Amino acid sequence: MSRVEIENIINKLSEMLQSKDMDAEDYIASVNLDTAELNIAGEWDQLKKQINNLDFKSAAESLNEIAASLNITVSGE
């Protein structure tokens, strides 16, 4: 997966979380991201749990931390 694809996933998720979009749960489940290769497996699992619990505020914070660890700037920040 290219860096641009990863950036697009993170930015789409960020927009969904900011708007408290209930489809974020389905979207993150459908994303096929090699989190082990990116060294974000634990963080990604935590993000999924937060989204599943509809904790959009914490999920947005976790997503920002993931983006920062990948040196990705989240749009709208």
Image (cartoon, rainbow, N blue to C red):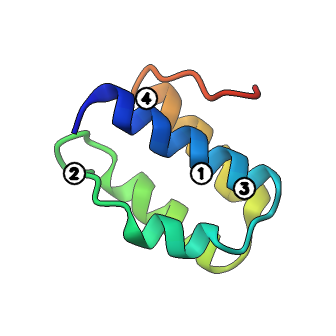
Q: Residue furthest bottom?
A: 53
Residue 18 relative to residue 11: left or right: right
Mark 2 and mark 1: Cα distance apart in space: 16 Å
Instruction: Classify mark 2: helix, strand or loop.
Output: loop
Vertical side of 73 occupied by 54: above or below: below
Q: Amino acid at mark 2?
A: Asp
Residue named by callout 3: 17
Residue 65 in the image, given as x and y percentages of width and height: 55, 37
Instruction: Classify mark 3: helix, strand or loop.
Output: helix
Residue 55 relative to residue 6: left or right: right
Residue named by callout 4: 69
Closer to the camera: disc 2 or disc 4? 2
Residue 45 in the image, given as x and y percentages of width and height: 41, 65
First in sequence: mark 3 vs mark 4: 3
First in sequence: mark 2 vs mark 1: 1
Residue 74's quadrant in the figure?
top right
Q: Residue at x 17, y 43 (%)?
A: 37
- What is the number of callouts on the image? 4
Q: Amino acid at mark 3?
A: Leu
Residue 5 in the image, given as x and y percentages of width and height: 36, 36
> Dot 4: within a 10 Å radius of its alpha carbon, few (fewer than 14), some, or many (20 or more) residues?
few
> Dot 2: within a 10 Å radius of its alpha carbon, few (fewer than 14), some, or many (20 or more) residues?
few
> Residue 72 or 41: which is nearer the viewer?
72
Mark 2 and mark 4: Cα distance apart in space: 15 Å
Q: Residue at x 44, y 20 (%)?
A: 71
Mark 1 and mark 4 residues within 8 Å of each other at the beta carbon: no
Mark 1 and mark 3 residues within 8 Å of each other at the beta carbon: yes
First in sequence: mark 1 vs mark 4: 1
Residue named by callout 1: 13
